[in-house]
Image: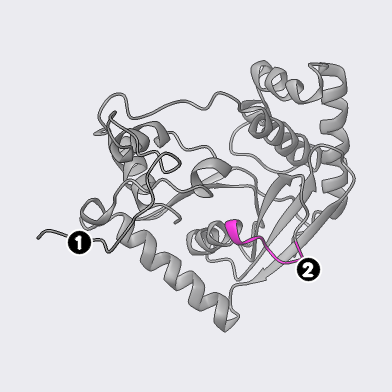
Amino acid sequence: MKCLWRACQDRLRHEGTLPDGLWSEQDDTSYADLGTCIHFALQDGTRCQFPGTSAEHAPTAAEFESAATLFAGNLVVTKERIRESATLGAQQLPKTPTGAPWLSEWAFESQFSTGHIDFLSPCRQIVGDLKTTSKPPVNRRVKAEHQAQMAIYHLLTGAPRGFVLYVDSMRASWATVCWVDFLQPDIAFYCEQVKTFCTFLMSDMLPTVAYPNLDHTNCTQCFCPYKGSCYEKQAFPPGREYNAAAAKRPTGTIRLAI
């Protein structure tokens, strides 16, 4: 939603038509891997119902080792911190309307989106997502970057209510739940706008309007696999640089020859 060029490249990669050399893997995935470990520990610890066996969704040894780099490589400390964060989150996890276990990691797909949902009540009345982060939400409101994801989950499942469970991933010092009422008029309007935007992303119009868009916020604060190719498309070619410090001050009126 923040960069149409990235959305276009992601779509081309999904369709298998992205040219070679435009994709770069993320070097450091430690925070994402820590989140994966906490997700499974919380879901499995609260007896959520996975599609298939729970072992099929367990983190790999490589993901545990990657997460351990955040704790000086100490795997014992890492697993203890994962357990603490998962336990804290489980204490704040809402109950389903019937008291039945949550459905976790079940896949949903529509004509414009897909998703593996963290929590879904069997009656499909509530959909939820777990976010492991170091910064709590302000005033118990869903963070802006997570609003569109929740709208997609609502559109995929039809659930009238949703929540985001935020858990401190590094210190296990806090956890909080932020609720969303998808039937509230403003939020219902937002969800329809997200649906319209996602439909546009899957249309033939997207490639005609997307362009490389290097930005100091989107490109530096989050990983983008296309940043290198964007830089090559936007950066000026090698040549003489204008040195403002050495330039002479103007002595008269500037005249332009047309």
- Placement of 109 over or under 195, stated as above or below: above
Residue under label 1, please give it. 255
Residue 82 is left or right of residue 14, and the answer is right
The image quadrant that residue 116 belongs to is top right
Q: Is residue 193 magenta?
A: no
Q: Nearer the viewer, residue 11 or 182?
A: 11
Direction left: furthest residue: 258
Determine the residue positioned at 58% across, 78% down. Answer: 183
- Residue 170 image label: none
Horizontal and vertical percent position of residue 15: 28, 38
Residue count near mark 1 (Cα–Cα under 10 Å), binned few <14, some 14–19, many ≥20: few
Horizontal and vertical percent position of residue 245: 45, 41
- In the rendered image, is residue 173 in sight? yes
Determine the residue positioned at 23% across, 50% down. Answer: 207
Residue under label 2, please give it. 139
Magenta range: 138-145
Secondary structure mostly taken by the magenta-highlighted segment of the chain: loop
Residue count near mark 2 (Cα–Cα under 10 Å), binned few <14, some 14–19, many ≥20: few
Residue 175 is left or right of residue 2, and the answer is right
